[in-house]
Image: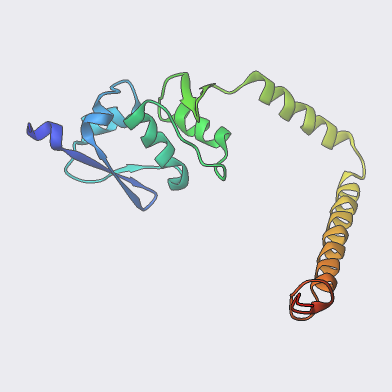
Amino acid sequence: IPAQAAQTVQFDVCGQLFKVAAKSIRAKPATHLAKLLEKQGCDSPIFVDTAPERFGCIVDWYRYGEMFVPRNVPIAAVMQDARRLGLPEEVVVNGTLRRTPPNAAHKVGRDLLSSLLRSWRGFEAFFEGVLRRIQAHFDAVARSSAEWQGPRGGGAGGGDGLA
């Protein structure tokens, strides 16, 4: 195996190290990570100022040509990272083609929401009321569930379920 093919590069992503085959990064020379690797080499970790919980998704793209974003990670944040790290304008995310540039619809939605919040007097009080009603609902569900299970948690009346 040629030495360059077996090389790995380490990225220090805000203190968390990611070890990646250097050839995977070099295969995408127009990206920011490839340019950093070209400039700094593989001898020491390359610092990348981005969220470590999303960086693995970026590394997926280098390895597999697409990203696999877990449900608990906001895709919009990963797209922002992708844009900042110089990935192409279109990437596949969880099997769907997505654009890394900001979506015009997102901007319109944010602007509309911002305008609405600025002009809606009493929104905070309204929203706090909604949150109180939601909390009251779930408190009632919890009480009902506790009453149904009884003190031993064994079903209706708290018994062991045996007749």
Where is residue 46 drawn, in percent x and y? 28, 42
Q: Is residue 119 left or right of residue 59?
A: right
Where is residue 135 drawn, in percent x and y? 83, 59
Q: Is residue 130 left or right of residue 62?
A: right
Where is residue 148 drawn, in percent x and y? 83, 70
Q: Nearer the viewer, residue 51 or 74?
A: 74
Q: How is the image coloured?
A: rainbow
Q: Is residue 78 above or below residue 135?
A: above
Q: Residue at x 32, y 20 (%)?
A: 30
Q: Nearer the viewer, residue 154 or 42?
A: 154
Q: Is residue 1 left or right of residue 157?
A: left
- Residue 112 image-quadrant placement: top right
Indicate the quadrant containing the C terminus: top left, top right, bottom left or bottom right: bottom right
Q: Is residue 123 above or below residue 132?
A: above
Where is residue 125 drawn, in percent x and y? 90, 51
Which residue is farthest left? 2
Q: Nearer the viewer, residue 132 or 1?
A: 1
Count of numbered marks: 0
Q: Residue at x 36, y 36 (%)?
A: 59
Indicate the quadrant containing the N terminus: top left, top right, bottom left or bottom right: top left
Q: Is residue 19 left or right of residue 1?
A: right
Q: Residue at x 42, y 20 (%)?
A: 88
Q: Is residue 100 above or below residue 114?
A: above
- Residue 4 image-quadrant placement: top left
Which residue is farthest front? 163
